[in-house]
Amino acid sequence: MEQMSEEGFAGAATLRAPVLTVRHGRGRTGGTTMLNFLIERARIGGRSVLIGDGDRRNATLAGLYPPGSPGGASQPETDETADVKDWIRTLVGRMVEMHASLVLDLGAGDQALAEACREIDLIAFCEAVGAEPLFIGTMGPDIEDFEHLLTIFRAGFFSTQHTLLVMNENLVRAGKTPLGAFDKILARPELIEMDEAGVKIMRMPRLNYMDQVRRTGLNFYDVAAGKRSKEGRPPDPLCQFETRSWINALEREFKENDVVEWLP
Amino acid sequence: MDGRKRGVGEDEGNEVGADMPFGGHGDVYRWLRANFAFVTSWMAKQKPSWETVAGKMAREGVVGAKGKPPTRRSVWKVWKRVLRDVAAERERELAKEVERAAQERELLTGVPAKKYPRDLPKDWAPDTVEPSPRGAMTEPAGRSLVPVSGVGTPQVGVSPDGQTESGVERIRRKFGEVSGRGPPGSLSEIGRRMSRQEQD
């Protein structure tokens, strides 16, 4: 049976600068799953993370981390640009005051959020306070997912050297292979340009038990460790095994891309 | 009375106004507490003698034990008590503040303060960041889609068979491995190679 690799537990608490993670991408491209994993990974490693869910139309992250609960997500009061800007200001202020990383889910490209980010100049702010900015773009095999991210890159509102493109294998339709499904995107010259500019491209492996993991109400690491859910039963052994393999595969992706130090 | 032993010349007997701030103490104590900021600033700037302080208090109508004006010695002794009490009070306030901050931090970050070690030292402060030499990060990047970290240097790694590969080549290889082609040396990869040789 596959053992959780050492890096699977995200290591011990280490001295790190706070990381401001901004996630963008179309809806249902695995952004929340990726951020959720990074939040769990950091917290299990003893690193503090604040959560901001700016995707009011599809507030999945706030659903996983209910606002007001311990470690819960924060949301802007409304979609109005002024409120959103205030919200981002408050969160990045807390990030500095509490020396905690901040994970910001900007969802499917809300214009107000994009404007807010452009006006606040978060990259310059991070440089000034010693925080590390990280941009995560998530996509499935749909070429529109890639086009959407291209638009965001071209707008340049969060243009950082730490940029991670995540290709989500969970969105590959049955009967297709990941290589075949992503072929059109992999052939795009813009992707090669990004690669040459230092953007890291990684895969999010398929986890067949994703829905079952969510239903347990446990985090990925607890499922992998076979802990009991609220119903009093541990997840079934195959689910535990697959989740462990999935965590290890993600860790290998981070390691091979040399981005472990970029993460919150 | 708070039951503490008091020295000669302190302001016992002036327990009136126990419902006022610092009630339970005498006039000298209450005046020194009420004027704590003024007295410390006065001492720091002009270094008045205790006799001068006692004189000012007497002029303002403060009386010590037995209704007599405070003396140099009585003011000095009460001042030591005031300093001790102020320090204790500040410590209590600080402890409350630390506890409140820990609770707030736990609520916001989800990391229980007592369970996990701090990820950054207590005295952490951001370094002064010099303007980045990597101009591309904040300057318009021209036609580039992202800031260039190594100008003109493709991001290459090494594949398991020792060949250099770009990020796109790496992701192709990884997708290939999970698309049934398998990593080099795997049964599926050997089988695929054999069938290709047969076709050739």
Image (tube, coloured by chain):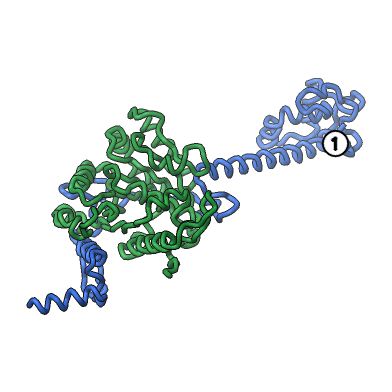
Horizontal side of A34 relative to A172 (left or right) equals right
Residue A256 appearing in the image: yes
Horizontal side of B182 relative to A91 (left or right) equals left
Q: Residue at x 46, y 43 (%)?
A: A65
Measuring from the top left, give residue B130's x and y in whole percent.
36, 50
Chain letter, colour blue in render: B
Residue B75: quarter of image: top right
Q: Residue at x 45, y 44 (%)?
A: A50
Measuring from the top left, give residue B195's x and y in whole percent.
14, 76
Farthest-out residue, left = B200
Residue B155 appearing in the image: no
Q: Residue at x 80, y 38 (%)?
A: B81
Q: Is B21 in front, or is B158?
A: B158
The chain carrying label 1 is B
Question: How dense is the environment of label 1, judged by Cα within 10 Å: few (below 14), some, or many (20 and up)?
Answer: some
Specify the colour of chain A.
green
- Name the residue tied to disc 1: B73
Measuring from the top left, give residue A143's x and y in whole percent.
18, 48
SS for dot 1: helix
Q: Is A44 in front, or is B10?
A: A44
Q: Type of residue at label 1?
A: Arg
Residue A3: quarter of image: bottom left
Q: Does residue A138 lie above or below A54 as drawn? A: below
Measuring from the top left, give residue A219's x and y in whole percent.
46, 52
